[in-house]
Amino acid sequence: MIRQFQLVEKVRIYIPEVDEATLNKAYVFAMRAHGDQKRESGDPYFSHPLEVASILAELHLDLETIITGLLHDTVEDTSVSLDEIEKNFGVDVRNLVDGVTKLSQIEWQSKHERQAENFRKLILAMASDMRVLLVKLADRLHNMRTLHFCASDEKRQRISQETLDIYAPLSERIGIHQIKEELEQLAFAQLHTEAYESIKARLHFLRQKGKDTVNDIKSQLHALIKENGISSVISGREKSPYSIWRKMRQRKVPFEQITDIIAFRILVDTKEACYRALGTVHSKFAMVPERFKDYISTPKPNNYQSLHTTVIGPTNHRIEIQIRTHTMQDYAENGVAAHWKYKQNNQEDKSEYRWLRGLLEILEHSSDPEEFLEHTKLEMFQDQVFCFTPAGDLISLPQGATVIDFAYAIHSDVGNHCVSAKIDGRLVPLRTVLRNGSQVEVCTSKSQMPSPTWERLVVTGKARANIRRFIRTQQREQYILLGKSILQKLFKKKSKSFSDRALIEFLPRLRLKNVDELYVRVGSGVYTAAEVYNQMFPDQERIAEKTDDEECVLAEAKSEKAPDRPVKGKTAISLHGLIPGMAIHYAGCCHPLPGDRIVGIVQTGKGVTIHTRDCSTLTQYESEPDRWLDVSWDSEADHHEIHVGRLYVLLSNQSGALAKMSTIVSHQDANIINFKITNRTETFFDIVVDIEVKDADHLTNIIGSLRAVSQIVSVERV
Ligand code: MN
């Protein structure tokens, strides 16, 4: 536990004229308030707020923030009131402590809907004062550092998952790289201990093996840049086990080379020197196209600035190089905190947090909080692509964004009516994926409307939410028309006069408020026309559930994008976007799992087949947009169901390799149900494994763990 004078010293380094009396007062105040409370580690509770204050001092934050660090748990855990805090430390500290207390009360593991609401609270708290989040992150960091003292396994897992899902991405977003890395590291070690250990062991091995290579590359780079009259500091920075794990989950290649785990960093004095150093490196080593990124001219949304390039290095392996100034480096490590330092006395300039505004906007317009959460979570992990409007305004979108995303980013009206775009003057279709630096001019037409297939083409939450909203409204209109015509035909056949008024009388019996509701239910297949008819004319001879006429109307309507006719019975799985009772099949080609992005294809007479969105089989339906159904997994439902995922594994032909594989699968609580060797050579086995898993994420974790095993050459999902 650090001492009182040590904390003061830490702050004095960067605020020489610090108000020591107030800092000491806060120290004593918090210590008294926590009294003899204890942490799970057995340490006095006060050691926690003190460490939190110390972390904040390392980020060189202002005095109010440090004091908030000391006091952050007093209102929640002791008898101290906010008024007392205000009386002693002023209204700003009061508001900060209040903000942190409110954030701490958020329960992330609650139901999805509540989680979204919590997210909303978090963003609002951040928008009001970024320092609240900084204290919260320091709090979380210290709790993660001491998490191994926590006796409950379930709690350790929960806190770690929450850290990975929420707090690490948030630290990344506000640019505090240091904290992000440490949070990820600690959480990863808790959640996937085995993978963590084996990656660490391999890192160690590669580090020993590649020591000379790294030093060699460093001195070559240094000499090269010096020759050109630029002074630089060069370091080789090892990637973290967690970032390697993530790459292994996502990418096909296992890591083999020392150069895969080291990124070289060149620090120079000026922006101009960055570009000169870059030119020097590129003139000596071949650059890998596509990998070059200029975050100096277009910084990341968290204000990160740097040049990134990958070149074929001296040993003929790819090496990653980052070039930036010392100041940019400080920003890269400390983000918003560094920003704070440089503008100590200025109010935080919120306009720089474009992404925050983006989130707030989605939040305001999202009818479905669950959708909102899904997308903000996703977007936080994605890299950005930067494009310009014809007027030169910068629009940043997640990697993979298309013209449609861009159009919606400008305005929902532009999105709803976009027909094509001109990228750098060339006419391109809507599905075109945007590239960095493009200038995009969206072409619109009044008669254009979003189509369900657009959803497959967008990656931003904003575009998706808008498209869904539009389709929902439009679908309802179609159901009304369809329902009405189904009933009309049946009535005509039975020689009954048909009018809205005739139906209105029967609405109470069907417990419906208006005729449109009835039409929607008939149109969407909740009621059959025969059911309605039988209800309305109970004395008449009952007509069969299905009439030829109805079939005929449905068939006609299909070409207007109406869903397939429902089959009686309960839905076996929970999917959004399907009418209950519809027959569902999982496609055998792609084995979709909960969590995968999916799409339904209407198979006449068979129901709906669910495919993953990237399934290659889908190309054969491309010309028939009417058969595509917009479906998604119901995330509210607990996935008690077990699904089967299929993996291709390439195993080296060594004794124990198979055993190792099955051990790992069972450690991940999954079950191998089918297993086939498709090819066997002296050195390798090709095998197909079917594994019962909970969802896609579960399978991805298994894949990651398998990739960490040295006898396993590659693992792919089918
Ligand atoms: Mn705390």
Image (cartoon, helix red, strand yellow):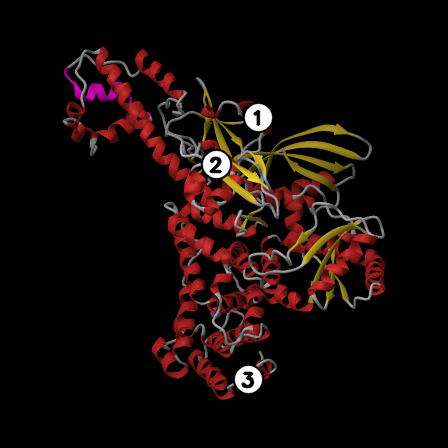
- The answer to whether residue 400 is left or right of residue 600 is right
Q: Residue at x 67, y 43 (%)?
A: 251
* Residue farthest along the bottom direction in this orientation: 21
Q: Amino acid at mark 2?
A: Glu
Q: Name which of mark 2 and mark 1 comes first in the sequence.
A: 2
Assign the N terminus to one quadrant of the image: bottom right
Look at mark 3 in the image and give the residue it sits on.
Answer: 4
Q: Which residues are magenta?
A: 525-539
Q: Residues within 10 Å of mark 2 (few under 14, many from 20)?
A: some
Assign the C terminus to one quadrant of the image: top right
> What separation in Å lies between label 2 and label 1 (alpha carbons)?
16 Å
Q: In this view of the protein, can residue 233 be seen by the observer?
A: yes
Picture coordinates of residue 441 (x, y %)? 53, 42
Q: Are marks 1 and 3 in contact (CB under 8 Å)?
A: no
Q: Residues within 10 Å of mark 1 (few under 14, many from 20)?
A: few
Instruction: Name the element at disc 2.
Output: helix
For the residue pair 547 and 384, the one nearer the viewer reads as 384
Marking on residue 619: 1
Instruction: Name the element at disc 1.
Output: helix
Look at mark 2 in the image and give the residue it sits on.
Answer: 455
For the residue pair 670 and 431, the one nearer the viewer reads as 431
Picture coordinates of residue 357 (x, y %)? 45, 56
Quick check: 404 above or below 23? above
Q: Amino acid at mark 3?
A: Gln
Instruction: Name the element at disc 3.
Output: helix
